[in-house]
Amino acid sequence: MVAIVPAAGSGERLGAGRPKALVTVAGDPMVVRAVAGLVSAGVDDVVVVAPADHLDEMRSVLPAPARTVAGGADRVASVALGLAAIGDADVVLVHDAARCLCPADVTRAVVAAVRDGHGAVVPALPVADTVRRVDPAGRLVGPVDRTGLLAVQTPQGFAPDVLRRAHEAAAGSPTASRATDDAGLVEALGGEVVTVPGDPRAFKITTPLDLAMAEALLTAGDVSDGPPLAPDVRERSSPHGAEVRR
Amino acid sequence: MVAIVPAAGSGERLGAGRPKALVTVAGDPMVVRAVAGLVSAGVDDVVVVAPADHLDEMRSVLPAPARTVAGGADRVASVALGLAAIGDADVVLVHDAARCLCPADVTRAVVAAVRDGHGAVVPALPVADTVRRVDPAGRLVGPVDRTGLLAVQTPQGFAPDVLRRAHEAAAGSPTASRATDDAGLVEALGGEVVTVPGDPRAFKITTPLDLAMAEALLTAGDVSDGPPLAPDVRERSSPHGAEVRR
């Protein structure tokens, strides 16, 4: 089982002045946490796609079994370069480095669904917000049907040939470079994508606010492998067993 | 200027065993923080719609000028009961107690847009996630067009007659009780709703994860009235000016 971790993004919105995947959360770079999470779920080969001008820095922080290759012009190109670097595997995962607190159980569920015969699998959660559409003037233009509306996360899992075909098709498409995930490329080819339950902790760290939340989660309790954060987790982690105010 | 704060929800998802609005964030009940935020934006009358069996507790924690009335069977009914309790005002705001970290600047922008002649105004942010739709079997059923897709927040602002007409119509509608916000009721009548920029800090606290994020924000720096949380805000709030690890 192999995972590709696209980590070539600049991280401009984090304002950190360095590749986003190298920004630390409670002391460890996001990409290191993301790789560790994959490994704890049983992934035995990880290809990290790094910014070409930060390859050495990426290599210096990454633990085994992670390997590093140079990224491309956009996310789709970077995943394709990662795909070119993998060997034989029954499952290929693609996982955002910025979703570095994703519990291992989510990864295991994605892998299990691929092994059950699904060619493309994504973790997804119901959209919590009231979602609306606006016209260019900023006026709401009618409700958006929330039935079955889901926010899609990573790791996304694929049968290797399904992911390869999707990227081969994307390489010839002028619009594919705007795709925000790999399941979208499979869908564009008419391929079936199934969902497994996502987890709030698999959120994408994009802004300083997200970073503050991630650090709070790591302070509050076991993030990587436990059940969803519950009130009693927060109480257990407080000093001297004191009651947490709420 | 008056605000209605629907705060009659049970808070089951927070697992706190008490009304959600009374759950504390860093020591203060959400509803107290929400009222304080409105007052700091210039609101001079606040009607909090409380669970009927927690009226006394709600009254005991709320600062002036907040008043308390008993809520109804659902959110729409509760806002209608709040609306019946307000006096004359040029602007009526409806604000979720659970969005208690909403910066005052967001509230001011909503009020300004109503005073500029817009009958219904909502703060909104672009949807950050990749959003998809699934069929009942959990298979993705094609992409959702993200053009103009926004997540709607509160406070929502209204010309009083616009909000009253929307709730009068809702009272006779079997589907209105499922409305998740007041702007939706205005839209259902064909009324125009305009948007102003929302703020990530105006997120709705629903789960223990959200609560952890809210506490992290309050620890990290000035939430209620400053610019969006930036990396240097976190550094300024660290002890002895030490560099924050990232």
Image: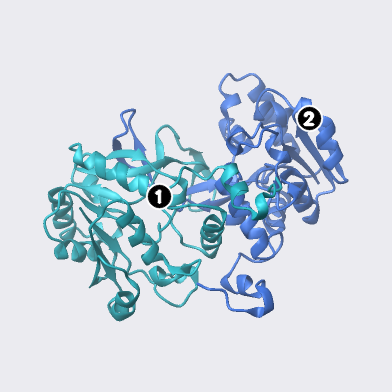
Chain colours: A cyan, B blue
Q: Position of residue A214 (x, y in %)?
A: 51, 58
Q: Position of residue A164 (x, y in %)?
A: 14, 54
* Helix, strand or loop for disc 2: helix
Q: Residue at x 22, y 39 (%)?
A: A192
From the viewer's side, name the closer residue of B120 and A74: A74
Residue A77 in the image: above or below residue B190: below
From the viewer's side, name the closer residue of B69 and B51: B51
**How many circles with numbers are drawn on the protein?**
2
Q: Residue at x 40, y 72 (%)?
A: A22
* Helix, strand or loop for disc 1: loop
Q: Which residue is mark 2?
A: B54
Q: Nearer the viewer, mark 1 or mark 2?
A: 1
Query: Which label was assigned to residue A103?
Result: 1
Q: Is residue A234 left or right of residue B4?
A: left
Residues at circles 1 and 2 in contact by the CB criterion of under 8 Å: no
What's the residue type where badge 2 is placed?
His
Q: Is residue B92 visible?
A: no
What's the residue type where badge 1 is placed?
Pro
Where residue B233 sits, quadrant-wise, is bottom right
Where residue B178 sits, quadrant-wise, is top right
Pick out the residue farthest to the right.
B64
Q: Position of residue B226 (x, y in %)?
A: 69, 65
Where residue A82 sits, quadrant-wise, is bottom left
Residue A85 in the image: above or below residue A226: below
**Chain letter of disc 2 in the image:** B
Give the Cα separation between the discs numbered 1 and 2: 37 Å
